[in-house]
Amino acid sequence: MEHGSYEDQTQATFSLNDEDHTLANSLRFVLNQDPRVSVCGYSIPHPSDARVNIRVQTTGDPASEVVKDSCQDLMLMCQHVRSTFDQAFTKFKSENES
Amino acid sequence: MFVLILKTESVQYSGAYASMKVDNSLRLDQFRSNFRVQVTKIEKDEKKEEDLIEFDMVGIDASIANAFRRILISEVPTMAIEKVLIANNTSVIQDEVLAHRLGLIPLNVDPRLFEFMSESDLPNEKNTIVFKLHARCGKGGRITVKSDQLKWLPQGSEFLLSTEKNAPSSTSKQRTYTSFSCNQDSIPELRDKPIGPKYPGINLARLGPGQEIELEAHAVKGMGKTHAKWSPVATAWYKMLPEVVLLENIEGEQAEKLKIKCPQKVFDIEDIGNKKRAIVARPRECTLCRECIRGYGWDKKVAIRRVKDHFLFTIESTGALPPEVLFTEAVKILEDKCERVITELS
């Protein structure tokens, strides 16, 4: 869910249910490396609620677009991690079982 | 990049070094060329099944490495006993304690073959595994009930629903606590590898003469964040690669002293001519205990640092899935989380 204003789309707070530091911290890391982002941070308003708020302020682009791009980047990173890991694993297997 | 660190965080803001004309923004190509993984160890249990993997993950930020670790512990699903129907328990161990012990038994079943059971779902062959346990101690002597006495019931529950007990049984099949539409044996993956506890020798209860336990245990799919019994890992952890640096040449008696100081035997001595000089031989063994820099002046001679983007990852599986599959599953789960955010925003 997005909390922003209709006039100014460059800043918004995204409230994600059923998420925690796992996604929020990695997403914050990717967002902060995006040159279009001026400020980004996240908070967990209450430890008993399964919810995180991610605040994004940009230098001009709509915040939701920037968040979507960052998610896309994070996904691509994950895919690369997976393929690299699989390669390393098969390499280790072939070296140690032949 | 070797940096002396006080905290695990790296500089993250894209424009952090803009005044130095260095662009710190994330570049996927750069990530792709820098990132590497090297498996260093795989351990197998007595059944020759993998249960531990150690690998180096280089060129990734702590926030993402930590996300993988957190997902491994709390969000990769497994199957575990959740419901126990106790028909008879005359042993000294109470019903609820016994049920708890049963819940913690690791089961050797691939959770990907099953579905989550929501509150409105009836237990069926796609979301429930049923086990039977019937143990009785005869006169004289005592017996120990172990996990291998749990017998898998691929047909589902054998206990009749209490509403069915008085009804005439002539016409149709009587209803039990599960509604399986087919035998779980007919699923090829389960036929090849029958379901059971991963380890046969886990003590469940001890029975005295005449005591008896008769029960049915229903296992469902769940996640470690609900209860630790569903966690697929004994533990999963990482540490940053330690970097031990000798700031000056340490020779002779001092070198001997340094070698003895370290409980992990990180340092060694090499002979150069007739001189003895200390070297850092095994930095990966360092636990950052700081023993080597204790005492006056030693912190000027030795520095302990950590390589911030080099993680030594260890995953210990409890047996449902091999550790390398757990890791790929964890990465997939992070991808799914991203995808969920994208679909919610568009």
Image (cartoon, helix red, strand yellow):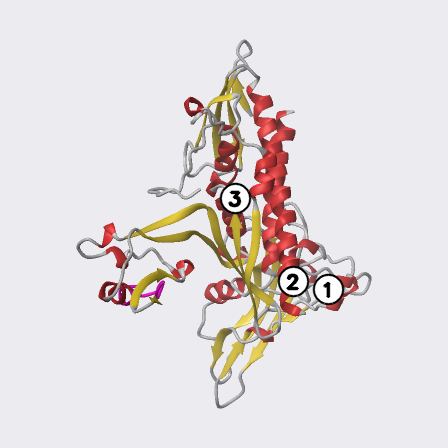
* In the image, farthest residue toward the bottom: B140
Residue B261 on image: x %, y %: 26, 64
Question: Which residue is rendered at x = 55% and y = 48% of the image?
Answer: B75
Subunit ID for the residue under disc 3: B
SS of the residue at dot 1?
helix
Please state which of residues A20 and B329 is positioned toward the viewer in this rendering: B329
Residue at the image position 62 percent from the left and 67 percent from the top: A96
**Could you tell me how far apart the alpha carbons at marks 3 and 2 are, in whole angstroms?**
34 Å
CA neighbours of label 2 inside 10 A, class few (<14), some (14 to 19), many (20+): many
Q: Quadrant of the C terminus of chain B?
A: top right
Q: Are marks 1 and 2 in contact (CB under 8 Å)?
A: yes
Instruction: Say if labels 1 and 2 share a chain.
Output: yes
Numbered badge on residue B109? 2
Magenta stretch, residue numbers: B259-269
As measured in the structure, the alpha-carbon distance from the residue carrying label 1 to the one carrying label 2 is 8 Å
The residue identified by callout 3 is: B59
* Figure quadrant of residue B251: bottom left
Instruction: From the viewer's side, name the closer residue of B28 and B76.
Output: B28
Circle 1 chain: B
A97 w.r.t. B124: above or below: below
Q: Which residue in the structure is indicated by mark 1?
A: B190
